[in-house]
Image (cartoon, grey):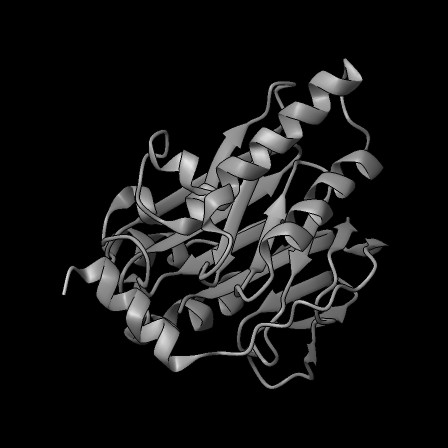
Amino acid sequence: MCELYGFTGKKTKQLNRDLTEFFSHSNAHPDGWGLALMNDNRHLIRKRQCAAHQSSELRQILRSPIRSEKAIAHIRFATVGYDDYNNTHPFWAEDDSGRSWIFAHNGTVFEGGEKLSPYQISQKGTTDSERIFLLLLDRVNQALRKKGGALDADERFAVVDGLVRDISHRNKINLLIDDGSSFYVHTNERGTLYSQENANGVTFSTHPLGKAQWEPVPMMTTLAYQNGRLLRAGTPHHNEYIPDEEAIAALFLAYSGL
């Protein structure tokens, strides 16, 4: 599986130490890295299909001070989709209102693929993660058309929360999503996403970083943060993902062509 890192700040934070430790995990996740930094409604995304610890570009990025209001980082271990730039995270796109969405996923879809299969034609890569992102964008655009105008924060939250509920049954859906205003977080597998809150804001990571105290992110609940503060939480669902090694092995073999 992959690993996620996220930050939403009450103020900008220097992220070099966190990111250096996070990307050091890439020995076990060698199939790509990505980093999105969001400041003042602008974003910068860098990603490559190589292992983070082998990337001279990433080393150069980490040598310079990195200060940001929000961030999403990802290291990939491929289960669905090949080693390719278009399969690296985070993904980015604009909805029909011009709002930017940035999306990263740690997990795998085993059931309910009929909701995602139509996007196999239009997607740039081959991952189920990208198909989830395209489904999200479609639902946002449907809500925009139905309303006839821009969605407010509650309406955008309802779309994200509804998507999570629809696709999380027997699937691992750990997500970090930014829509330029709200920062969404979701996990449904125990022990796979942690948070740490301090004066700077809230940091998220698949594994705790450093020596400070981290807490598990609440399970099976869509959370929305803004400026480092929790503003919205969905009603908890019951779609806990429990790993099935046989199903994982079968899926891996199917996509590796063996």
**Is 232 left, or right, of 129 in this rendering?**
right
The x and y percentages for residue 90 are: 46, 47
Q: Residue at x 44, y 41 (%)?
A: 45
The x and y percentages for residue 118 are: 42, 34
Q: Residue at x 66, y 36 (%)?
A: 180
Count every numbered label the image shows and give the total. 0
The x and y percentages for residue 46 are: 39, 44
For the question of whether residue 38 can be seen, the reply is yes
Task: Examine the image and state in which quarter residue 212 appears.
Answer: bottom right
Task: Tell me the quadrant of the picture where the N terminus can be found.
Answer: bottom left
Q: Is 126 located above or below residue 210 in the figure?
A: above
Closer to us: 167 or 97: 167
Task: Examine the image and state in which quarter residue 248 appears.
Answer: bottom left
Residue extending furthest toward the top: 148
Q: Is 204 located above or below residue 166 in the figure?
A: below
Task: Examine the image and state in which quarter residue 185 appears.
Answer: bottom right
Q: Residue at x 57, y 72 (%)?
A: 241
**Is 6 left, or right, of 253 in this rendering?**
right
The x and y percentages for residue 18 are: 53, 68
For the question of whether residue 89 can be seen, the reply is no
**Is 16 left, or right, of 33 in this rendering?**
right
Closer to us: 149 or 74: 149
Q: Residue at x 14, y 65 (%)?
A: 258
Closer to us: 239 or 47: 239
